[in-house]
Image (cartoon, helix red, strand yellow):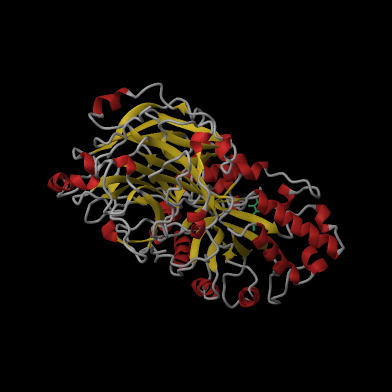
Amino acid sequence: MKCPPRPGRRLASLLGAFVAATLAVAGTAGAQPAPVQASTLGAQAAQSGRYFGTAVAAGKLGDGTYSALLDREFTAVTPENEMKWDATERSRGSFTFTAADRIVGHATARGQRVRGHTLVWHSQLPGWVGAITDATTLRSVVRNHITTELSHFKGKIYAWDVVNEAFADGGSGARRASVFQNVLGDGYIEDAFRTARSADPSAKLCYNDYNIENWSDAKTQAVYRMVRDFTSRGVPIDCVGFQSHFGSSGPPASFRTTLANFAALGVDVQITELDIAQAPATAYADTVKACGSVARCAGITVWGIRDSDSWRSGENPLLFDGAGNKKAAYGAVLTALGGTAATTRAATTPASAAALPARFSWSSSGALISPKPDATHNIAGIKDPSVVYYNGKYHVFASVASASGYNLVYLSFSDWSQAGSATHHYLDRTAIGSGYRAAPQVFYYAPQKLWYLVYQTGNASYSTNPDISNPNGWSAPRNFYSSMPDIIKQNIGSGYWVDMWVICDSANCYLFSSDDNGHLYRSQTTVGQFPNGFTNTVIAAQDSDKYALFEASNVYKVQGSNQYLLLVEAIGSDGRRYFRSWTFGSLAGSWSPLAASESNPFARASNVSFPSGAWTKDISHGEMIRAGYDQTLTIPACKLQYLYQGLNPNASGDYNSLPWRLGLLTQTNSTC
Ligand code: XIL
């Protein structure tokens, strides 16, 4: 059977003259230009690459006022009590993570980062731990607690408070007496950090304490000496948390100095549990400014949302009153968040968030992945990649094209240097089957604990698999729609229905698709109904010049912000493929151009350097390397990477037989 036709089967370069005439000024794809308003704490903090978080209680997630504020204002969460020892390992070896999982699930589905709090602490510690007197037993109990908890949440935690409050108050600078200190001695802190690093190398590891904000205090100095010792000896520590439970006079005058001095040791600093008696606006503003003036101050967490949620509720120390109204301190924080950019991160950590820049520049690899024809697969090109990094490996799905049509291939590798030697698993040998299958998109649908592969077959289709690494685990294709939605039939003209893309927020999933005729469509269903129920198909963006809004649309959530990013592939005046970009504040919202023209493209040969040789002039259908792998399609805001298809510029002939290869772009103008 001949495969249904695929867009752009004509040779792209033949389009040059026509497109030049129509694309002199790139259109805005139906966008209503509106600057991204940083009207929330999280969005405002993201402008300088920081997060703004809050402590969260699992039991309050069902409170509508509470969760509406949480979802609107905050880009990070810390479980207030749910990850503590008395909540997770009440009796030895018996672990419960239900309440903490609820918080992590809520946050992850919204692209909020999670601070893990806390592993080794003298308080909220079950009696059975406090009763241990034997060092060997206690050491193995502590290691097991850390390893089990970190393994459970592996890959989902931005930073762990590994050890909490290990130093004594007052002028001694001594360690606090605790079962850990008394039975194990000074080495227990170092041992905890080393254990944590091996259990989850992707999380930042913090030491967290209170009354260490004033530089000259003996307790501050003692913690500083410990961190300096750790960094000088290579003990794995990435950050110091300053709890910042302040009285009504707010932070000490030296707070900025303290943050800067710790940061100079090569660690991030974070304000982790901020609350201030009576919440004076200036005290809050001073605290925020102290963080904003230190590049390695990665973010601020307040210890609760409304005054009524606070552990110090009698002192009304938070940013929202008991009814959820913004207090004066809220406005002061929003204003003060315009600090200088956060610029540095520890190398071991996931990318932190920032507003996307208005211009992009990239460096490209050579062709990393080429077709691997075998006796029954006479493949000419490998195209349309989808990629997730999961369980220590990149998992790449792509179209394979030949004169006879399209199907899919899967490969995995742990490092880009191994991409070329990875085995190609042809998915026509699986239940996905032979025939027209193209342009895959892969993600983990967390609510169902299932991987989805979305692709085009003439309809929008999908297969599922409990194990992404098992190519034989995919189910047979099923369709999202009973038939092409009417609005597409009415607008598709002589185009093709292609490039299906699913992304979900906390409530809904959206299915985007293109028609090679200047329209981007969007259907929606609820998170609960997915993959069924896609209806309400609308035109999400359009351009009267179809080549300016052609195909291969990607939509992503930008980590640590309330921004979404839309990329659409266009065909330029030179006949070559490139990407335009827009941002928007909600998935069903309207778009604002970001880098959306030929002269200021998102990614085009003109803003890409090729240190290993300019092997392509097309930057065509691809996908961003994500920060996670679930249905929220969250990408980092910094150091973007984009896997794309490129082509020998001299190649010609039948579109399906062109020798497409895959290469990787790395952003070179990241400011964070
Ligand atoms: C507090 C919680 O807010 C309360 O709900 C709980 O009863 C006691 O602990 N330092 C810390 C936090 O590191 O874990 C504490 O949180 C506040 C002080």
Q: Nearer the viewer, residue 441 or 399?
A: 399
Q: Nearer the viewer, residue 17 or 29?
A: 17
Is residue 469 found left or right of 199 in the rendered image? left
Relative vertical location of residue 656 with respect to residue 282 in this rendering, above or below: above
Relative vertical location of residue 513 with respect to residue 156 in this rendering, above or below: above
> How far across and how far down the image is residue 400, in percent?
41, 41
Is residue 28 found left or right of 106 in the rendered image? left
> How far across and how far down the image is residue 392, in percent?
58, 53
**Residue 539's image quarter?**
top left
Ligand 1, seen in the image, is in the quarter at: bottom right
**Residue 237's image quarter?**
bottom right
Relative vertical location of residue 116 with respect to residue 170 in this rendering, above or below: above
Is residue 457 found left or right of 318 in the rendered image? left
Seen as rendered, the residue at the extreme front is 375
Q: Residue at x 62, y 43 (%)?
A: 101
Q: Nearer the viewer, residue 274 or 61?
A: 61
Seen as rendered, the residue at the extreme left is 21
Residue 501 visible (yes or no): no
Is residue 569 found left or right of 71 in the rendered image? left
Q: Residue at x 31, y 44 (%)?
A: 568
Which quarter of the image is occupied by the C terminus? Answer: bottom left
Q: Nearer the viewer, residue 519 or 465?
A: 465
Residue 533 visible (yes or no): yes
Which quarter of the image is occupied by the N terminus? Answer: top left
> How far across and how far down the image is residue 382, in percent?
40, 46
Q: How many marks?
A: 0
Q: Residue at x 45, y 52 (%)?
A: 625
> How far across and how far down the image is residue 553, in percent?
34, 42
